Image (cartoon, rainbow, N blue to C red):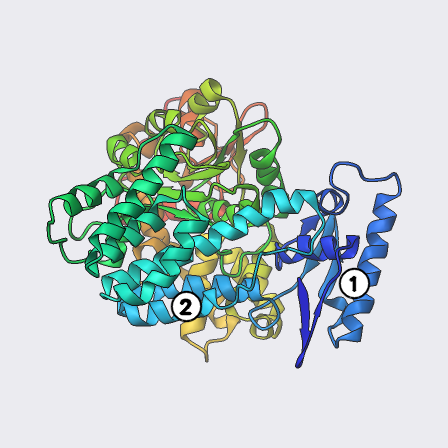
Amino acid sequence: MSIAHGPETVVLKPSKPTSLLAALLLHPNTVVSTTYLLRAVWDEEPPATARAALQTCVLRLRRLFAEYGISATTIEAVPGGYRMRSDTETLDLVQFRTLAAGAAAVAVTGPGEELYRLREALSLWQGQPLANVASRMLQHDAVPALEQERLRVLERVCDLELAAGNCHQVLVDLYESARRHPVRERFTEQLVEALYRTGRQAEALAEYRTVRDRLRDELGIDPGPGLRRLELAILRAEELAPAPPPSARTAAATGAPALPAGATATARPVRAVPPVPAFAGRDADRRAVAARLTAAGGPRLVVVSGAPGIGKSALARQTAHEVQEAFPGGVHTLQLARPDGTPVAVEEAARLLPEPAPGRRLIVLDGAAGARQVLPLLPAAEDAAVLVTSRRQLAAVVATHGGAVHRLDVLRPAEAYGLLAGLVGTERIAAEPAAARELASVCGHFPLALRIAAGRLLTRPGLSVADCAAWLAEDPPVRLALAEDTGLSVPEVLGQALDALAPELREAFLRLGAREAAADPSAGESESVLEQLVEAGLLEDGPPGPYRLHDLLRSYARWRLRTHETAAPAAPR
């Protein structure tokens, strides 16, 4: 932990303010709860005056920042805790994660640019992280997680170097990594491969046998299949096949199965989970879900449910970003729905689940179609916290495995305004605040619709917010769509959800949509049908309170009746 000011670098002394600063910087741009900060500074024994002392630590840090030209408002006091704003110019950790994420994004253009960015990211690491931070909690929880982030990038760098045939150049990295992390088999596998490819068969076999003996003596296990195949190839003096492309090597390193040509893996282990762009609001929802996932006492299961387009996946990704430090074993995301809305087969999803790893893991099962798709996957994830998103509430899942269901509603008006401002730009939205609120209302305060409207504004710089709102209001279900992406289309997303229902439920939904907004949706409908529509995410609440149909869903139902369906007769009274 150090502060660089021009040519001068000051290494901070181990102290309570240093521990506090470390805890804040480990969660940049995120509200860090007072409870977490107290534990980080005083571990498990905070004094009775700890909250007052925490404020004193903040004041000391602000004075220290002032000495080095750092704004005193960098540490913000917010309800429930503190937040420290950081970016790529002010914090190496943010720069590292940005470079790593950017490298993955440019991988399709060629390995050279990806390798350059990853090397630049690794150059930011200087020595053991948090070496001068006294907090036992951060040393126990945060330092291993940081090290895993670095090692994953280093593995990828070595994969790229080997794929490019740079076996001699990468040996220095691999010798050091294999010695320091002997039970991380991928480094040894890369080292053995590099030695063999450079004509040093005896050294390659010696490295393999050293690791094999260590694994047997210390852990009672044999090397993995990758190392065993290499040993057999060396013993047979076989010529190794050309190095596979980096993407295939990465899949092998993470335990993912080989995929056929053209296939895309949908399960990906991630440590540096990026935040959702322009995510706004949902503070209470995020806190509730995060508290359940990270609660002491072992694995937790949380189902986030709600209507199509309500923002379930975004909430899951943002929450995973904010709690990732609590899961040193990694955060793994498995998409359970294909782009066309059809569910991934259970057998395929099971093959893509990650293997158990040291440290607690978080597994995100995104877009579950129902309990039958989720239940077979849970035994393989019994050591992990599991976050499931689904239009359905998955009562059968929580009834048999415990956990909680967190149902999302539309954004509040202020949250919808904030989402538009974050996507389109604060100045442009603030110039027409009334029109922005009207636009949010036209979108029904649905995150999906708001992002579509923002996309239209961003691609038309001369379009006023008021004109955009008026144009969309003429026919929201049709015009809330971006032609280049069916995932950003209200009629596509809601149509997939409606078409997945049984005919009698689809007809009941359309009947509800045909009624006036003030009418009682339950009139003339059986409670069983209404409850099934609630379960499908197309109707809200229910006994003991009234049922509700969101305005955007009502608008879509009327458009569907007008253009696709013949109105079903009213149910007998």
Q: Residue at left 78%, top 52%? A: 16
Closer to us: 568 or 139: 139
Horizontal arrangement in the rendering, residue 220 relative to residue 303 (left or right): left
Distance of label 2 from label 1 (alpha carbons): 32 Å
Q: Quadrant of the N terminus?
A: bottom right
- Residue 3: x and y in percent read 69, 69
- Residue 458: x and y in percent read 44, 72
- Kind of element beneath mark 2: helix
- Residue 548: x and y in percent read 52, 36
Q: Nearer the viewer, mark 2 or mark 1?
A: 2
- Residue 7: x and y in percent read 66, 81
Q: Residue at left 60%, top 43%? A: 141
Give the residue number, with chain letter if any, for mark 1.
Answer: 61
Q: Quadrant of residue 554?
A: top left
Circle on res. 119: 2
Q: What amino acid type is highlighted by mark number 1?
A: Leu
Q: Quadrant of the C terminus?
A: top left
Nearer-N-terminus badge (2/1): 1
Q: Residue lying furthest top in this view?
A: 400
Q: Residue at left 35%, top 41%? A: 211
Closer to us: 488 or 571: 488
Question: Label 1: few (<14), some or many (≥20) within 10 Å?
Answer: some
Q: What amino acid type is highlighted by mark number 2?
A: Arg
Q: Is residue 450 visible?
A: yes
